């Protein structure tokens, strides 16, 4: 069964008979799915392949960047510039309109970051990213000893670029996303198969947080890419596919994929197609509700009046 319905509430979100379609394949380890709402194009990383690709329905797959410094998570900033987490270089970078690269973060307190993994931008321009050690291990990165003694979540201040450490008590923070109103920051912890949620403070920091949900299963996969739909439901990659939770943490569905799901983006003009990066391939699945767009300005247009 591709769509596993665990609660009737899931029927409002997805057709249990929805088809899962492979749109591209032949990669090594796909990640970092990101939808460009104006160009109707999917951007994604192939970490182990050390390359980034773009895909659209007309032209198919084309190379976007090679080498990519083993890029992982991607997002857009408020100006529509690409922000990327790089495993091999331990950097967070921004691609400028002329194609040049600006480094936003590479060190904390004089030591190299571990390997920035996933990244989101708040509506005030602040950048939040996770920094586990996965990119310092083979095959998803360049083997090397970490310089920091912790894996944390960070915030880059939009005014002066100051890097602040947040949520330090997670073992290996991975996927992260905001709630619709940005009052909450969800962060998952891969080894513990948990999602934690933090209240975002007025200064952009977060509180001590609490457990939001467990992401169960013995199938391949760990909590990884994570996003919300326009009803506030939380979608999280995990064992056996993408797990869907209500805003209060009830697990209501699992969207099973032919390969291990690592990340995804809500795409197409209505943001109701789930584009999933899953190891060697990219798959898509139609939903009954839109996801939260990542392209700047698209969220306001997608929100119901």
Image (tube, rainbow, N blue to C red):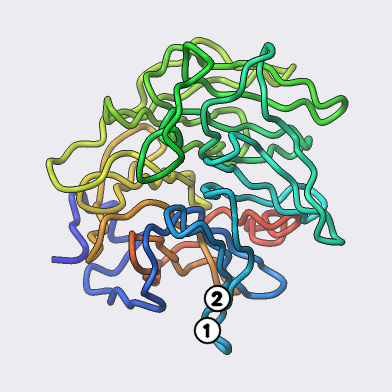
Q: Spatial distance from mark 2 to mark 1, Cα to Cα?
A: 5 Å
Q: Earlier in the sequence, mark 2 or mark 1?
A: 2
**Badge 2 density bin: few <14, some 14–19, many ≥20, Cα 10 Å:** many
Quadrant into which the C terminus falls = bottom right
- Identify the image quadrant of the N terminus: bottom left
Q: Quadrant of residue 52?
A: bottom right
Q: Residues within 10 Å of mark 1 (few under 14, many from 20)?
A: few
Secondary structure beneath dot 2 equals strand
- Relative to residue 124, is residue 82 depicted above or below? below
Q: Is residue 163 left or right of residue 45?
A: right
Residue wearing tag 1: 60
Residue with the mark numbered 2: 55
Taking the spot 58% from the left edge, 49% from the top edge, the residue there is 69
- SS of the residue under disc 1: strand
**Mark 2 near mark 1, Cβ–Cβ under 8 Å?**
yes
User: Left of 108 or right of it: where is 171?
Assistant: left
């Amino acid at each position: 069964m591709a769509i596993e319905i665990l609660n009737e509430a899931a029927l409002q979100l997805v057709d249990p008979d929805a088809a899962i379609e492979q749109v591209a394949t032949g990669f090594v380890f796909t990640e970092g799915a990101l939808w460009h709402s104006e160009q109707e194009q999917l951007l994604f990383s192939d970490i182990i392949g050390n390359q980034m690709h773009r895909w659209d329905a007309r032209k198919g797959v084309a190379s976007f960047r090679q080498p990519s410094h083993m890029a992982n998570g991607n997002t857009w900033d408020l100006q529509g510039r690409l922000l990327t987490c790089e495993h091999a270089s331990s950097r967070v970078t921004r691609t400028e309109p002329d194609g040049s690269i600006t480094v936003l973060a590479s060190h904390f307190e004089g030591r190299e970051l571990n390997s920035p993994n996933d990244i989101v931008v708040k509506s005030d321009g602040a950048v939040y990213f996770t920094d586990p050690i996965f990119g310092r291990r083979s095959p998803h990165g360049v083997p090397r000893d970490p310089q920091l003694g912790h894996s944390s979540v960070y915030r880059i201040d939009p005014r002066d670029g100051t890097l602040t450490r947040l949520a330090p008590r997670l073992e290996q923070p991975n996927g992260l996303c905001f709630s619709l109103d940005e009052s909450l920051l969800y962060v998952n912890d891969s080894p513990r198969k948990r999602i934690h949620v933090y209240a975002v403070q007025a200064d952009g920091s977060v509180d001590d947080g609490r457990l939001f949900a467990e992401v169960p299963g013995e199938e391949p996969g760990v909590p990884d890419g994570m996003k919300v739909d326009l009803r506030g439901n939380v979608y999280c990659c995990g064992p056996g596919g993408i797990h869907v939770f209500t805003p209060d943490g009830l697990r209501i569905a699992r969207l099973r994929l032919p390969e291990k799901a690592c990340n995804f983006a809500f795409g197409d003009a209505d943001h109701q197609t789930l584009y999933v990066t899953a190891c060697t391939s990219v798959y898509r699945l139609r939903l009954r509700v839109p996801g939260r767009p990542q392209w700047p300005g698209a969220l306001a247009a997608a929100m119901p009046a």
